[in-house]
Image: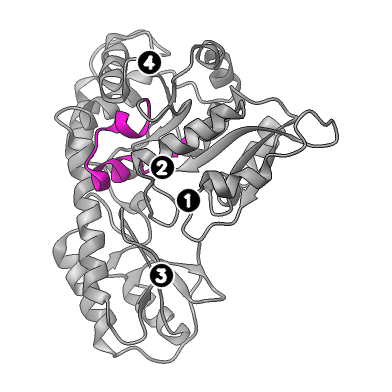
Amino acid sequence: MSHSGSFASDNTAGAHPDVLAAMARVNTGHAPAYGYDEHTERTRLLLRRALGESAQPFFVFGGTGANVTALDAVLLPQDCIITAATAHIQVDECGAPERHIGCKLLPVETPDGKLTPALVGPHIKGVGFEHHAQPRVISISQSTEYGTVYTPEEVEALSEFAHSRRLLLHVDGARIANAAASLNVPLKAITSDAGIDLLSLGITKNGAVGAEAVVFFREEPAKRFKYVRKQGMQLPSKMRFVAAQFEALFTDDLWRRNAAHANAMARRLAEGVRGAPGVTITQQVEANAVFATLPKNRIAPLQEKFFFYVWDEATSEVRWMTSWDTSPEEVDAFVAEVGSGKWGGGGGGGGN
């Protein structure tokens, strides 16, 4: 099967040239291992400036590893995590939190992937009762798996709600750059300033090769995390190469420019297909994702030319993702195909 382009995921995009150049720059001579090198320390300071002085970043390999080790640092096996039913930790991490932490996840149904105090409240029960898993963390995705975005005020409301009930607020920030760019706010406006406790900070989807970080805004879990990270197999030995990717993206706001471009391409795509026969956009387009329903028999023929996933086979809802390197020409070619009306036959495609 030959594809004209991919709207499957921002994971399919390559690395930004500045990221590759930064990795090449640190590839000289020998340097202390496990993060004790000057490149890593310089990058930690760069992240503190972006996230707030209370931020304590630790570099790791991948998104699932970041989520699991971050949560492991603040949870006991009898605890539970309250999260959206669509959350990555609930749907797309193969039970990793349950297996490696031993805790329970409490999924909350939402219309748009976003939690609110009103939605979370009914799930905080059985506190102190040994027959119930104990609520300990509220976990949100920013931006959400539906491409929707929490405003600073919404994050702060959840943070205050959590703290009033002696819970912590975790943010899965695999696409937090897209959220900040969409809101046109600094990263600290939706992290430290909004009162969150821990963050999985992702850059792989925004132009890196493979680099994530766990960031704590409280002292106690940060002290414990160096052991959790090692036991969780997330301690890079040649950490300078992970740090270099962050340094490239956090220099001169490259992270924001990449994310803003991806968001703009999603808006271009959404506006282009809006009103096309049989196409209904199902979510607000706030970051770099477009969700839409199509007639089932149109999905497979379109997938023959452009790679994308079916989000919900029952409703024929699809997800179209844009990336830092998606071009206007690629979007326009896709829009033209969607609106051409030349599809026919076949059944629905799969993937999630």
- Is 136 left or right of 116, judged from the image as shown? right
Q: Tag 2, which secondary structure?
A: helix
Note whether residue 59 is visible. yes
Q: Decide: marks 1, 2 in contact (CB < 8 A)?
A: yes
Question: Alpha-carbon distance for marks 1 and 2?
Answer: 9 Å
Amino acid identity at mark 2? Glu
Question: Alpha-carbon distance for marks 1 and 4?
Answer: 26 Å
Q: Tag 3, which secondary structure?
A: loop
Q: Which label sits in the foreground, 2 or 3?
A: 2
Question: Mark 1 sits on what residue?
Answer: 114
Q: Is residue 341 magenta?
A: no
Question: Mark 2 sits on what residue?
Answer: 154
Question: Alpha-carbon distance for marks 3 and 1?
Answer: 15 Å
**Sequence-wise first label, 3 or 1:** 1
What residue is at 54 percent from the left and 57 percent from the top? 110
Q: Tag 4, which secondary structure?
A: loop
Q: Quadrant of residue 228?
A: top right
Q: Decide: marks 4, 2 in contact (CB < 8 A)?
A: no
Q: Quadrant of residue 327?
A: bottom left
Q: Where does the image place residue 168, in percent across and percent down from the top left?
A: 55, 28
**Sequence-wise first label, 3 or 4:** 4
- Is 139 left or right of 194, judged from the image as shown? right
Q: Observer-nearest residue: 250 or 39?
A: 250
Q: Observer-nearest residue: 151 or 285?
A: 151
Q: Tag 1, which secondary structure?
A: loop
Q: Quadrant of residue 175?
A: top left
